[in-house]
Amino acid sequence: MNREQKPEQGEVVIEALRPFGTSIFTEMTVLANRYHAVNLSQGFPDFDGPGEIRAKAAEAILRGPNQYVLSYGVAQFRDAVSRKVKRFYHLDIDPDQEVTVTSGATEGLCATLLSILEPEDEVVLLEPAYDSYPPVAAMARAKVRYVSLDPPDFALPRERLRQAFGPRTRAIVINNPQNPCGKVFGREELEFIAALCAQYDAYAISDEVYEHLVYDKRHTMLLTLPELKSRAFVVSSTAKTFSMTGWKVGYVIASPVLSRAVRMSHQFITFCGQSALQEAMAFAMDFPDTYYRQLLQDYTRKRDRLSDALFDMGFKVYPCDGTYYLLADITGLGFDDDVTFCRMLPEKAGVAAIPCSCFWKERRAGRNLVRFCFCKEDATLTEAIKRLRRYFK
Ligand code: PMP
Ligand code: GLN
């Protein structure tokens, strides 16, 4: 999302999408490629997930069938989601009625929002908000009420949140852990949100794609709040947990009634996901706890390494409790505009990052903040640190 871009003359785009322009992730990856920069912008690993998962997918493709699957997903995958939710959150989920497989969490969010929002409904977004939420709300012709979580701790501003709810509020989207600020919502904060949803008869949509990247705290899956059983949609993805962002295998968990709503829009967006990839990810989700622990250990080390290095260079680095992103303040280095900074960095320093003002509606907020991802090989991080040190010395 980049609100500074104007549509080219003669470009065809509906009014609702005009403010958004090209995604900031595309813009920064294109820049990184142009200058052969180390790409710490768009959040994808520079290594692939386990070979056994890829072998399963290859085997499934060769064996076949390679045809449409059930619109709401391959049974094996839905069963595996149900087992994983039981293992990690002690929650019983009916794989037939409460899980819908989507093309990544991106489609899961889109299908969910399009299935519940009527024109003029209001949806509450917590800033810094992930880039796909506002345009999807716009496509549904809904209105967004923004509530900013502010540094240094990104605590839930309870009074402002209460004021953002009203008779037209249809839903709130929570991103837990939150990209790009690394915040992990505690149970109490989620209970506060749940109470508002009950009071205003609204839905809560929780984007939990980084659920297995929670470092020093515990992840609270939204559906473990009993009061949200009939109001919550939990959207997740296999992209980050199994380091395969290009596969786009995501899912939505919700009560049978709410799942029927998601399935209604999902069937007309993509109809169904990819059969072989769902089968392979079903296998992956059953990996033993040691896999999940190792992933967390590796990312903890990478996080601490990059965070220490950025701090030594003069960035103010915020704590990252979850996700694989570090938020860094550029003020101490003499910069005051994140977009200018990130457009300059690939060419001048040979490293790419994401400007964070794009995650706020009013770009005034976040202008001092940039995001570096650390989901990279150690050698890649070494090279990025070396280049940044050289530039900022
Ligand atoms: N939500 C958030 C907060 C994200 O950072 C991302 C990027 N992975 C997505 C959703 C999209 O996930 P997927 O690649 O599964 O569509
Ligand atoms: N979620 C990724 C990020 O935050 C980007 C995914 C995308 O490009 N849509 O960097």
Image (spheres, rainbow, N blue to C red):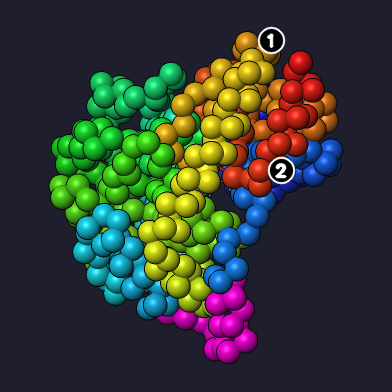
Q: Which residue is mark 1?
A: 334
- Mark closest to the chain's N terminus, 2 or 1: 1
Q: Is residue 201 left or right of residue 84?
A: left
Q: Which span of residues is magenta-colored?
A: 54-72
Number of residues whose C-alpha sits closer than 10 Å to that of mark 2, classed few (under 14), some (14–19) or many (20 or more):
few
Q: Quadrant of the N terminus?
A: top right
Q: Is residue 295 left or right of residue 308?
A: left
Q: Quadrant of residue 251?
A: bottom left
Number of residues whose C-alpha sits closer than 10 Å to that of mark 1, classed few (under 14), some (14–19) or many (20 or more):
few
x, y percent for residue 246? 61, 60
Q: Which residue is mark 2?
A: 379
Residue at position x 56%, y 17% in the image: 316
- The answer to whether residue 239 is above or below residue 307 is below
Residue at position x 54%, y 70% in the image: 53
Which residue type carries mark 1?
Gly
x, y percent for residue 338? 65, 22
Residue at position x 71%, y 30% in the image: 385
Q: Quadrant of residue 259?
A: bottom left
Residue at position x 69%, y 10% in the image: 334
